[in-house]
Amino acid sequence: MNQPINQRYITSITAVVLLAPLSAAAQDAPGFYAGVYGGASAMASTSFSESRATGPAVGGKVAFGKGIGFGAAVGQRFGNGWAVELALDERGNFLKRVGGVAVDGNVFSEVVFLNGYYRFPAWGTVRPFIGAGLGYVIGLDIDVDRDGTEQEYSRKGGVAVQAIAGGEYSLSSRWSLSGDVRWSRMSSGTFKATTTGTMLSGEPKYQPVSLNLGVSYRF
């Protein structure tokens, strides 16, 4: 007698769950690796106020322009689809407006991340993966240039988190290309001014999204 439909589904799902790690292991030799990546970066809107010893203050919603980011990582694959890495991530975006007032300037971050990945069995020639990271903010700088004068604000320390999704294409047993999207968020904090009499208030949030291409080498 044929199995009921629901029972067939349960049997199929169970088989996939049990066999997926075996399939992943067959495609993933254990070992250490190193890689670099980079690509376009975009920033979610935030808000802050900036005041100076002379001239009017500006404040309100902040609009960002184009950005770019780079990173380098070293890690280990465990041969079962899982991997862990330590990565240095740097990103920057231009400032366009603060509270409707046109400004020049930029935002730059430097973060060290501990990332974990899981690589799924390959779909054709591409192997999809997901990842998550916990990081420490080495530095976060905001430069605001208005009325012909640039002021710099910075902070150090704090926690960063990120989620990663992408795909990997093997060029050989050692070289691989990858593409991914990374969503990051860093804890709010107080920025210190480099010039007396200037102040950046509002504890702006830093939430970049980046689209990256990378290359890695397995030792």
Image: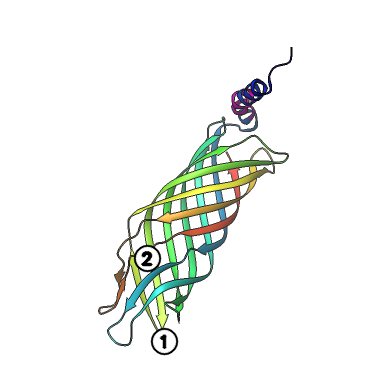
The residue that mark 1 highlights is 148
- Dividing the image into 4 quarters, which one contains the C terminus? top right
Tell me which segment is drawn in magenta: 15-23
- Look at label 2 and name its amino acid: Pro
- In 3D space, how far apart are the residues under numbered discs 1 and 2 (Cα atoms)? 23 Å
Residue at 25% across, 78% down: 196
On screen, 21 above or below 130? above
Q: Is residue 20 on the magenta stretch? A: yes
On screen, 136 above or below 93? above
Residue ranking furthest to the top: 1
Residue 12 position, x and y percent, is: 66, 24
Residue at 74% across, 12% down: 1
Residue at 61% across, 49% down: 215
Q: Main secondary structure of the magenta part?
A: helix
Identify which residue, 5 or 90, lies in the foreground. 5
Scheme by which the image is coloured: rainbow
The residue that mark 2 highlights is 204
